[in-house]
Amino acid sequence: MKAIRVHRHGGPEVLVYQDVDARDPGPGEVRIRNRAIGLNYADVYYRTGEFPAPSFPFTPGLEGAGEVVAVAEGVRDFAPGDRVTYYCPVPGAYAEEHVVPAHFVIPLPDSIDFATAAAMTVKGLTAQYLLHRTFRVESGHVVLVHAAAGGVGLLLTQWAKHLGATVIGTVGSPEKVAIARRHGCDHVIEYRTEDFVARVKEITGGEGCHVVYDGVGKATFPGSLDCLRRFGCFVSYGTPSGSIEPFDITTLAIKGSLHATWPVLPHHLARREDVLAMSESLFGVVASGAVKVPIHARLPLAEAAEAHRRLESRQTTGSTVLIP
Ligand SMILES: NC(=O)c1ccc[n+]([C@@H]2O[C@H](COP(=O)([O-])OP(=O)(O)OC[C@H]3O[C@@H](n4cnc5c(N)ncnc54)[C@H](OP(=O)(O)O)[C@@H]3O)[C@@H](O)[C@H]2O)c1
């Protein structure tokens, strides 16, 4: 089968499209023919070496959607032909087929097509736990979402709005302002040209937000802490602009008895019942139309390098899917 392989860390050019052998599923595993593969910022980290490579050469990619082609003996929940979507904690999805632990495989409702599933599984499950488990967003809350026009960002903004929050989004270009607004942002700040802390204070009448979802990192820290009201919650969940410098924990006291956390998806998916409950919650808001899954680019799998170039240079909005 065809797959993207990485033989050494480096720029997008190290993503090589080549032939590899498909393998049979081992105990507890399911083999899936990918119909669509999701692009995630973490794929960049595995490529550059910021996240450790599983081995060399390796196939990147953390999510896909397609049909089950084989199951290991003893796997009861799936059978060949089933429509599924999946997250995989060990990369390997940039391929025509992938073998995944059944634990992370999710039955796909007929109403959701494969591209939509691949565009929303990692990003949507992340939005689900950020809004419902990390901090419980409720009607009346004021929420700040950084990189609001991004993959996770556009799902977070729509879902937070659906929960009754006032949503403030930051974005990196004028074109992204319109996109963020269309997806539920009440206020949009261009944080490359505007002082986002001053603007948040102005919008909230000096009060600040209940929660900041920060998937940007170095460029928005410590400003994000200054956007919070007393007892507010700083949720750091990604660092495309670079890692946050270590900071003194008493900063949280000084800035208003704040809470700060860095959650990750694999911890939230550690129990099978949570995989199913979180995906049911996600499929529910998508089926009702409350959250639309914005697929703003579809590229052939062979063009994964181009997809990485666009993601790293901040050209993408919403989700990008790769089609094998
Ligand atoms: N913790 C978890 O469980 C978890 C799970 C999924 C994703 N994540 C993280 O969530 C974040 C968003 O992921 P995504 O896949 O949806 O990506 P994305 O938001 O679609 O793309 C990244 C965005 O970050 C912004 N950005 C700011 N500074 C940047 C810089 N120096 N270089 C590149 N981009 C920069 C850009 O938006 P602007 O131009 O608008 O600034 C860019 O479009 C990533 O950090 C990812 O690692 C975490």
Image: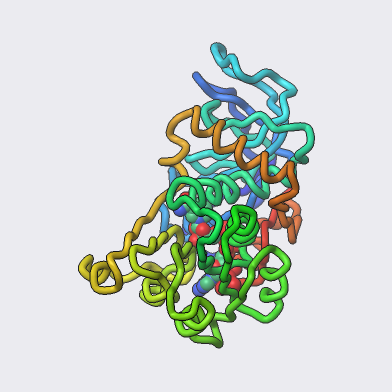
Specify whether 266 is left or right of 96: left
State the residue lying farthest toward the top.
74
Q: Height in image: 245 above or below 79?
A: below
Q: Position of residue 159 (x, y in %)?
A: 62, 54
Residue 42 seen in render: no
Camera-side residue: 270 or 33? 270
Q: Residue 144 at what x, y percent from top left?
A: 51, 67
Quarter of the figure that contains the N terminus? top right
Q: Is residue 136 left or right of residue 279?
A: left
Residue at 34% across, 68% down: 230
At x 50% / y 83%, what residue is drawn?
A: 202
State the residue in front, 206 or 188: 206
**Count of numbered labels shown in the rendering:** 0
Residue depicted at 55% across the width and 51% down the height: 127
- Give the quarter of the image for residue 82: top right
Name the quarter where the C terminus is drawn. top right
Does 75 sit above or below residue 138?
above
Q: Position of residue 320 (x, y in %)?
A: 69, 57
Location of ligand 1 given as a quarter of the image: bottom right
Q: State the colouring used for the structure image.
A: rainbow
Residue 165 rendering spot, x and y as whole percentages: 57, 60
Q: Is residue 128 visible?
A: yes
